[in-house]
Image: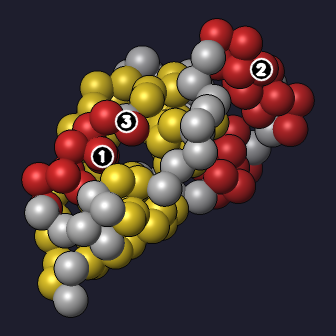
Amino acid sequence: MATYHKSVTLNTKGNCDIIDVTGRIEDIVRESGFKAGICTVFCSGSTASITTIEYEGGLLKDFPDAMERLVPEDITYEHHLRWGDGNGHSHVRASLMGPGLTIPFIDGSLTLGTWQQLVCCDFDNKARSRKIEVMLIGE
């Protein structure tokens, strides 16, 4: 077993911006030369998440709408009262989704389903530069 690491930087728009990172992560798996193992994808920061979604227009609208119903932006958050930055909802959304996930890969390819893409969701209330860490353990 060996490890391989690479970082990916994204510029996001914030406000539930959803960016498909599948191709970039698949490229890193191929670059590693590993045939089988696990790939961990982790987004540094407390207002963004990594998840999977079917990256299509309907879900790109449905997902932010669902987040608004689950964690509304326009209610009182103690975080906002303390810091005045208006992004308490962003922290809660990211905490619920989680900062990363691990995907197995076999024959040098991620084992994603046909309609499953890896995405970074930026929940902050402003544009950001996001750093995604990709760590492979494989052979």
Give the mark toward the camera: 2 or 1. Answer: 1
Q: Quadrant of residue 19?
A: top left
Give 94 or 116, whichever is nearer the viewer: 116
Q: What residue is shown at x 16% (from left), y 84% (from top)?
A: 2
Quadrant of the image occupied by residue 42 = bottom left
User: Residue 46's spot in the image, x, y percent?
Assistant: 49, 53
Amino acid type at mark 3: Val
Q: Which circle, 3 or 2, is nearer the viewer?
A: 3
Q: Residues within 10 Å of mark 1 (few under 14, many from 20)?
A: many
Q: Give the Cα separation between the discs numbered 3 and 1.
A: 6 Å
Task: Give the structural element (helix, strand or loop) at label 1.
Answer: helix
**Residue under the image location 61 percent in, 17 percent down:** 56
Judging by the rendered image, the residue that carries numbered circle 3 is 21
Which residue in the protein does label 2 denote?
Answer: 62
Q: Residue at x 21, y 89 (%)?
A: 1
Badge 2 crowding class, 10 Å Cα cut-off, few under 14, some 14 to 19, many 20 or more, is few
